[in-house]
Image: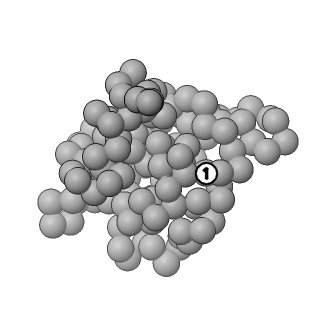
Amino acid sequence: MKKSCPCCSGKLYEECCEPFHSEEKFAPTVEKLMRSRFSAFAIPNGEYLWKTTLPSKRKFHDKNDLESWGKENTWTKLEIIQSSEKEVEFKAYFTDKFGKENIHHEFSTFKKVDKKWYYVSGKFLD
Ligand SMILES: [Zn+2]
C-alpha cells in the first residue's frame, strides 16, 4: 500500500523522502534534507540520521540513540517556519512516551561537502 510521507508534504513517501532514505538520490536543498530527517525520526531510521550528519559532528551522535528517540515518540507534524540556502527553522510536533505533546522548535545549520548537504547543528528556540 502506498503511504503518505511522514514529513507532511502531502506527497507519497515514495515520491518524497524515500529516494533520500534509500540513497537513490541526495536531498538537493536543506529544506528537503530537513524533511527527510524528520521522516527518518518518524520511521525511524537512525542510520540515515547519522549519515546525514556532518562527518566531523558524528561523534556527538549515536545511531542507536537517534533510532530510539525516533521510536519512543510519535511524530505528528513538521512545520517549516523559514528556510534559506544553508539554514532551516522548523517546528517538529511529537507526542512523547508519557503521552505529552511537545514542540521541538529549532534553527538548524547545514553544510555542503562534495555536493551533499549535511546537518551541522541546531539551536533550540523557545
Ligand atoms: Zn517527505
| Residue 22 percent across, percent down from the top left | 32, 54
Work out whether residue 88 can be spotted: no
Residue pictured at 56% horizontal, 36% vertical? 92
Compared across the picture, whether 81 is left or right of 24 comes to right
Residue at 27% across / 38% down in the picture? 84
Q: How is the image coloured?
A: one colour
- Residue 79 point in image, percent of width and height: 48, 28
Position above or below: 74 against 59: above
The residue carrying mark 1 is 70
Helix, strand or loop at label 1? It is: helix
Q: Is residue 84 left or right of residue 2?
A: left
Residue at the top extreme?
Answer: 10
**Percent coordinates x, y for residue 117 in the rendering:** 26, 56
Q: Quadrant of the N terminus?
A: top left
Residue 57 picture quarter: bottom left
Above or below residue 61? Residue 119 is above
Q: Where, quadrant-wise, is the C terminus in this rendering?
A: top right
Q: Please identify the residue farthest to the front as the structure is shown.
A: 1
Position of residue 30 measured from the top left corner of the image (x, y, whole percent): 29, 45
> What amino acid type is highlighted by mark number 1?
Gly
Residue 42 seen in this snapshot: yes
